[in-house]
Image (cartoon, rainbow, N blue to C red):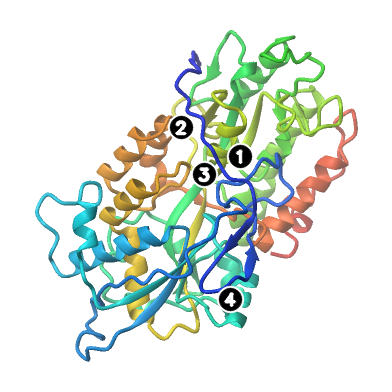
């Protein structure tokens, strides 16, 4: 089923495009890690800063320790947090935390409406220093540089949970979570904590997640309209056939020979197995494979490969246009896969010309579950104030008022909270041009499949490197060499 779409009202988002940020009490610069190194287009990152921007060197902010470990002695404890928020936002979060921890939040006040002037009057006995990170967090190499410089944070946003566990940079949180009402509450979506658990120990607190979605270039929408949110892979193929048949379209009159209906369809391979079975399936069916369901994993991947190979053979997908250029960067693509964190990026590169869809479904009654990448806050293995640091991090990620205050102070699109709260999700849906996509995902979050989402993950790196090679070796007739799951997983 298709639906008509007006392209009016899609806001242009201005993003920065340089991958350098400055931090804490030093002129030393650290290069940030892009989420998808080597992926296209290279049109900037929503997680980075302009070259002439610098982060505040220190946020001298205070809050209280709900465990009472500091208030009993009168000692002042200083912690450092490395999160993707500004100095002033961390300050106000700590002030809100103080009010809520001490039962001082006035009736009717919440994160969306509390007076900022009132927050600024709150005096608290704990210092919180702040380092601002990219939205996709930091990797072990950045943590190593911070450690060498003497300013390793107590809490930091990790790019990939597996990498910081493997490097020994993340401390297990069990000893601090026994009485943590937020982490143990029913408000956290099913699977979010499990995704941050290794060998029975929890290593992260889920701050937010991003979703794998499809982007449509509105310059190349056929008369039949864009697909509805519940569309099958067969309907997607029919849509791409309609795009291919359009001929000369768009403001720049791209010839049909240059138009690529779907740019780089091989990127879909790890994510769309559920569209062929109706069963939520892990990233590249890896979860099924490691559980011993090798036949199910092989069948899932084989179904996807047959479909993707057909798209290439029918001329409905290509990794480059007739000039050998990247079709997304050249604006010659009708559709492609992306992460929801990149929506603002593409809205800027294609002002007023983008529309977004969830991944294809099994049928018209079975929505595709979200394929999510989770970004956790982790405790440094060298922190001396773990109890307080974990409690404050839990508040930031899992308290609805904290989340509403963050959205109020630093609204960003494409990042999904990991807690059940109708007011928070409604606010997100109302404050973005893509509110319908937010509303689509909310009731599906308990069924979400958590996937590695960047090259900080060994599995993500192995799978994407193998798929890239697989696609590059495809012949003009669409014939490919055999696909080996064992080789694809790279031993992971």
Q: Specify whether 9 is left or right of 22.
A: left
Residue lying at the far bottom of the rendered structure: 73
Residue 345, image x, y percentages: 58, 39
Question: Closer to the camera: disc 2 or disc 1?
Answer: 1
Residue 163, image x, y percentages: 61, 69
Q: What residue would you read off at disc 1? A: 338
- Pick whichever of labels 3 and 1 is earlier in the sequence: 3
Depth check, front residue: 44 or 240? 44
Q: What residue would you read off at disc 3? A: 211
Depth check, front residue: 6 or 349? 349
As helix, strand or loop, the secondary structure at mark 3 comes to strand
As helix, strand or loop, the secondary structure at mark 1 comes to strand
Q: What residue would you read off at disc 2? A: 366
What number is the disc on residue 146? Answer: 4
Asked whether residue 293 appears in the rendered view, the answer is no
Looking at the figure, which quarter contains the C terminus?
Answer: bottom right
- Pick whichever of labels 1 and 4 is earlier in the sequence: 4
In this rendering, the answer to whether 116 lies above or below 280 is below
Question: Closer to the camera: disc 4 or disc 3?
Answer: 4
Q: Residues within 10 Å of mark 2 (few under 14, many from 20)?
A: some
Q: Residues within 10 Å of mark 1 (few under 14, many from 20)?
A: some
In this rendering, the answer to whether 387 lies above or below 202 is below
As helix, strand or loop, the secondary structure at mark 4 comes to helix
- Pick whichever of labels 2 and 1 is earlier in the sequence: 1
Q: Give the residue displayed 46% in from the left and 78% down from the top.
A: 172
- Pick whichever of labels 4 and 2 is earlier in the sequence: 4
Distance between mark 4 and mark 3 Cα atoms? 30 Å
Distance between mark 4 and mark 2 Cα atoms? 47 Å
| Residue 256 lies in quadrant | top right
């Amino acid at each position: 089923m298709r639906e008509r779409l007006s392209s009016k009202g899609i806001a242009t988002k201005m993003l920065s495009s340089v991958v350098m940020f400055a931090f804490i009490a030093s002129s030393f610069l650290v290069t940030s890690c892009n989420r998808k190194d080597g992926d296209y287009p290279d049109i900037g990152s929503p997680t980075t800063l302009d070259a002439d921007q610098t982060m505040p060197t220190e946020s001298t902010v205070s809050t209280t320790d709900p465990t009472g470990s500091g208030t009993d002695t009168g000692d002042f404890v200083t912690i450092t947090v490395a999160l993707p928020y500004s100095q002033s936002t961390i300050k106000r979060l700590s002030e809100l935390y103080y009010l809520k921890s001490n039962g001082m939040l006035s009736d009717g006040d919440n994160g969306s409406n509390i007076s900022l002037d009132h927050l600024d009057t709150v005096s608290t006995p704990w210092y919180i220093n702040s380092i601002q990170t990219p939205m996709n967090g930091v990797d072990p190499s950045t943590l190593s540089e911070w450690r060498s410089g003497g300013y390793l944070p107590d809490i930091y946003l990790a790019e990939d949970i597996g990498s910081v566990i493997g490097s020994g940079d993340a401390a297990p949180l069990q000893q601090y979570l026994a009485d943590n009402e937020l982490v143990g509450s029913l408000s956290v979506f099913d699977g979010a904590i499990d995704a941050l658990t290794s060998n029975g120990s929890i290593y992260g607190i889920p701050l937010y997640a991003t979703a794998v979605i499809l982007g449509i270039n509105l310059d190349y929408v056929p008369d039949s309209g864009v697909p509805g949110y519940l569309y099958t892979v067969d309907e997607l193929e029919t849509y791409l056939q309609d795009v291919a048949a359009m001929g000369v379209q768009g403001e720049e009159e791209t010839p049909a020979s240059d138009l690529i209906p779907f740019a780089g369809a091989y990127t879909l391979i790890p994510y769309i197995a559920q569209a062929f079975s109706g069963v939520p399936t892990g990233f590249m069916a890896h979860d099924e494979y490691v559980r011993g369901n090798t036949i199910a994993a092989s069948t899932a991947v084989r179904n996807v490969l047959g479909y993707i190979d057909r798209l290439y053979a029918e001329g409905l997908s290509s990794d480059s246009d007739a000039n050998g250029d990247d079709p997304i960067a050249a604006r010659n693509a009708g559709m492609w896969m992306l992460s929801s964190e990149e929506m603002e990026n593409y809205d800027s590169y294609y002002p007023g010309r983008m529309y977004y869809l969830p991944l294809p479904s099994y049928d018209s009654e079975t929505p595709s579950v979200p394929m999510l990448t989770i970004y956790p806050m982790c405790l440094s293995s060298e922190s001396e104030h773990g109890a307080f640091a974990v409690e404050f991090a839990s508040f930031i990620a899992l308290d609805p008022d904290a989340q509403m205050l963050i959205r109020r102070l630093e609204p960003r699109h494409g990042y999904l909270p990991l807690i059940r709260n109708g007011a928070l999700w409604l606010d997100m849906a109302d404050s973005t041009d893509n509110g319908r996509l937010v509303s689509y995902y909310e009731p599906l979050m308990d069924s979400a499949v958590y996937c590695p989402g960047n090259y900080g993950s060994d599995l993500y790196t192995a799978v994407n490197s193998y798929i890239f090679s697989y696609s590059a070796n495809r012949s003009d007739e669409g014939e490919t060499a055999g696909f080996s799951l064992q080789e694809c997983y790279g031993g992971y």
